[in-house]
Image (spheres, grey):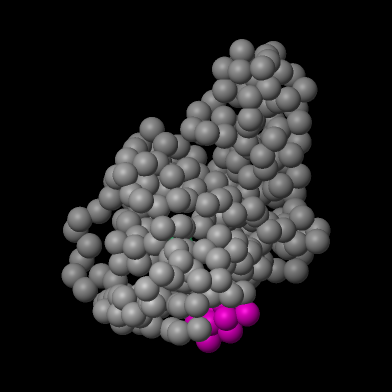
C-alpha cells in the first residue's frame, strides 16, 4: 500500500497503473478509523476486484465544521489508520494537508439542494452539507473513481451525495455500506472516542429510541400522528439525560415525512436521530 500526500503524486500513481487494470474505488474518510470504515474499504476491495485500485482518502475537512465544533480536537491518527487500511485491502492512501486541498480559500463551493440538505442535520448544522459536497466533489475530481463507498451511518450524507452524483451526471456508482455496531449495538463512530465509559453504555439509548419510534409508527400505520410520536420520543430521551436535536421517521428515498396513505401501504422508512450526550453529539439511524 502506498501513501501519497499531494494531488500530483496521487495522479501519477493512478496514471502509472498497468493497462487493463480494474475500477478505481474511493472511500473518503476523515481518518481516526474504526471497523465501520474498514468494512467500507473491504466492500470497495470486493467491488473493485483484484485488478482494481482501492483508494482511501484521509482529510479532516475544515469546510464542514462550524466554528464551535471539534475541528481542532478531531483526532489525527495517520500512522495507525494506514496500518488498518493496509490490513483491510486498501492500495493507496491519499492524505493531503490543508494547504494541498485548499491552497487558496475555497471560494467555489458545491451547494446541495436545500430541500434535502437543509433538513435534519443540515438544519442543526448550517453549511455542513455544502462543506461535505465541496470536498467530496474535489476528491471525485482528483481521484476520478468509478466507484465510491459511503456509510449508511451518515444516512442523510449518503442521500445528498447520491443526488450530487445524479445532478452532475458524474460517472460514479455510489455504494452504500452498512453501519457497523458494537456487540451491544452502538453504531461505531470516530466521535465515540469522546464518550466516557458510562456515556458509552448510555449511548445505546439513542438507537433503542429510534427502533421504538419506528415500531410505533409501523404499528399505528395510517393513524400514526408523527409529530406526537416524535415529540414523545424526544421527551423520553431528554428524560434519560440527553439533549435531542431530532428524532424522526422519514421516507428512505428522500427523507420527507410520509403521508398517511404511504404509512398504510408500509413504505420503506428510516428513523433518524441526533442528540447530545454530555458534550458529544451522536447521530444514528435505523431502517425499517
Ligand atoms: O463522512 C465523512 O467522514 C466525511 O463527511 C467525508 C465524506 C469524508 C467528507 O469529508
Q: Say if the magenta span includes residue 249.
A: no
Residue 10 can be seen in this image: no
Q: Say if the magenta span includes residue 85.
A: yes
Where residue 160 sits in the image (x, y, percent)?
43, 44
Considering the whole magenta stretch, tell me its main secondary structure: helix
> Picture quarter containing residue 23?
bottom left
Q: Which residue is drawn at 52% across and 64% down?
A: 48
Q: Which residue is drawn at 49% across and 48% down?
A: 158
Does 228 sit left or right of 245 as displayed?
Answer: right
Q: Which residue is drawn at 75% across and 62% down?
A: 182
Name the one closer to the observer, 217 or 158. Answer: 158
Residue 39 can be seen in this image: yes
Residue at the far right in the pictured view: 184
Q: Give the range drawn in magenta.
A: 78-87
Q: Residue at x 63, y 59 (%)?
A: 278
Name the one closer to the observer, 197 or 188. Answer: 188
Where residue 69 sits in the image (x, y, percent)?
44, 62
Does 80 sit left or right of 2 as displayed?
Answer: right
Q: Is residue 128 above or below residue 39?
A: above
Does 168 sit left or right of 28 as displayed?
Answer: left
Amino acid at each position: 500500500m502506498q501513501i501519497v500526500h499531494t494531488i500530483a503524486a496521487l495522479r501519477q500513481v493512478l496514471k502509472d497503473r498497468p493497462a487493463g487494470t480494474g475500477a478505481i474505488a474511493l472511500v473518503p474518510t476523515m481518518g481516526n478509523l474504526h471497523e465501520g470504515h474498514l468494512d467500507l474499504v473491504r466492500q470497495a476491495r470486493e467491488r473493485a476486484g483484484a485488478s482494481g485500485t482501492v483508494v482511501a482518502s484521509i482529510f479532516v475537512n475544515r469546510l464542514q465544521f462550524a466554528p464551535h465544533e471539534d475541528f481542532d480536537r478531531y483526532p489525527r491518527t495517520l500512522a495507525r489508520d494506514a496500518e488498518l487500511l493496509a490490513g483491510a485491502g486498501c492500495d493507496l492512501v491519499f492524505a493531503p494537508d490543508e494547504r494541498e486541498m485548499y491552497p487558496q480559500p475555497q471560494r467555489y463551493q458545491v451547494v446541495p439542494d436545500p430541500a434535502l440538505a437543509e433538513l435534519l442535520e443540515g438544519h442543526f448544522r448550517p453549511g455542513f452539507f455544502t462543506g461535505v459536497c465541496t470536498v467530496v466533489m474535489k476528491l471525485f475530481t482528483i481521484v476520478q473513481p468509478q466507484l465510491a463507498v459511503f456509510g449508511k451511518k451518515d444516512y442523510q450524507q449518503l442521500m445528498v451525495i447520491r443526488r450530487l452524483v445524479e445532478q452532475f451526471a458524474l460517472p460514479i456508482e455510489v455504494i452504500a455500506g452498512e453501519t457497523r455496531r458494537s456487540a451491544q449495538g452502538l453504531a461505531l463512530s470516530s466521535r465515540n472516542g469522546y464518550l466516557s465509559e458510562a456515556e458509552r453504555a448510555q449511548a445505546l439509548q439513542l438507537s433503542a429510541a429510534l427502533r421504538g419510534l419506528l415500531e410505533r409508527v409501523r404499528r399505528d400505520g395510517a393513524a400514526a400522528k408523527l409529530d406526537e410520536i416524535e415529540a414523545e420520543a424526544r421527551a423520553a430521551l431528554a428524560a434519560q439525560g440527553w439533549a435531542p436535536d431530532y428524532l424522526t421517521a422519514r421516507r428512505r428515498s428522500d427523507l420527507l415525512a410520509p403521508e398517511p396513505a404511504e404509512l398504510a401501504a408500509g413504505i420503506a422508512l428510516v428513523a433518524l436521530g441526533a442528540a447530545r450526550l454530555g458534550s458529544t453529539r451522536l447521530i444514528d439511524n435505523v431502517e425499517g
